[in-house]
Amino acid sequence: MTRKNRTPRKRGRRNDALEQIRGPPVNVFRYRGRVKTRDEAGDLDTRVTTISNFSTLSSTVGGVIANVFTSDPSLSTDFADLALDFTRFRVLTWEIEALPINQYSKTTTVCIPGVGVLDRNNATALASLNAAEGYPSAKRLSLENPWTMKLDMDDIDEGSYIQLGAPVAFSWIKTYFAGLTPSTDYMQVLQRWRLQLRDRR
């Protein structure tokens, strides 16, 4: 008895669609589908939220403001609550918004316009306006008008997740003003951190 040759069955569109969803068999070495990270695939429980903190920008007894703001979000009182629900985080965006307390009402003799810079290397305060010359991010600021400065997550260090129990700063925003009225409050500052949290407890 002779065996009939069977015609191979054609792959239907349904099978092709299933392969795109499920991926190729494990013995197939060529893969043309999209490579997904665990976050994209939904394997991790993540959350994005924004927390904030208020502070005051004041001059010293010498009439100078040389302030350093840090990207460490633990300055916010809401940060401790997040640590109760998640174990790791990263800062997606950090923004500072400054508003004058008494616009145009301060009395100064030589009120030099100020400067602000973004620094990803160290937390050392600016010692003068000229110290900002080496920063590409240098921006002229005024104590009599609102201003904002913003820093987005950039490199692999800033994109790495950090333990909520041990937060660290990867960047700083520095401001410098001189010739001001000594020991005077000039601006109210609002800091906002947009965080991505993961690994729910």
Image (tube, grey):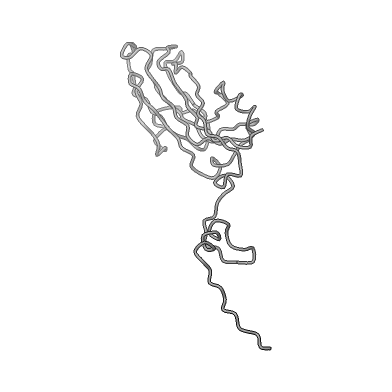
- 65 above or below 132? above
Q: Quadrant of residue 72?
A: top right
Q: Residue furthest front?
A: 1
User: Which of the two residues, 154 or 138, is positioned nearer the viewer here?
Assistant: 154
Q: How many marks?
A: 0
Q: Position of residue 164 (x, y in %)?
A: 62, 31
Q: Quadrant of residue 18?
A: bottom right
User: Which of the two residues, 45 or 198, is positioned nearer the viewer here?
Assistant: 45
- 41 above or below 134? below
Q: Residue at x 46, y 17 (%)?
A: 56
Q: Residue at x 64, y 66 (%)?
A: 27
User: Which of the two residues, 86 or 141, is positioned nearer the viewer here?
Assistant: 86
Q: Position of residue 152 (x, y in %)?
A: 46, 37
From the image, which quarter does the N terminus lie in? bottom right
Q: Position of residue 43 (x, y in %)?
A: 61, 44
Q: Quadrant of residue 189?
A: top left
From the image, which quarter does the C terminus lie in? top right
Q: Residue furthest right?
A: 1
Q: Position of residue 109 (x, y in %)?
A: 32, 14
Q: Residue furthest left?
A: 104
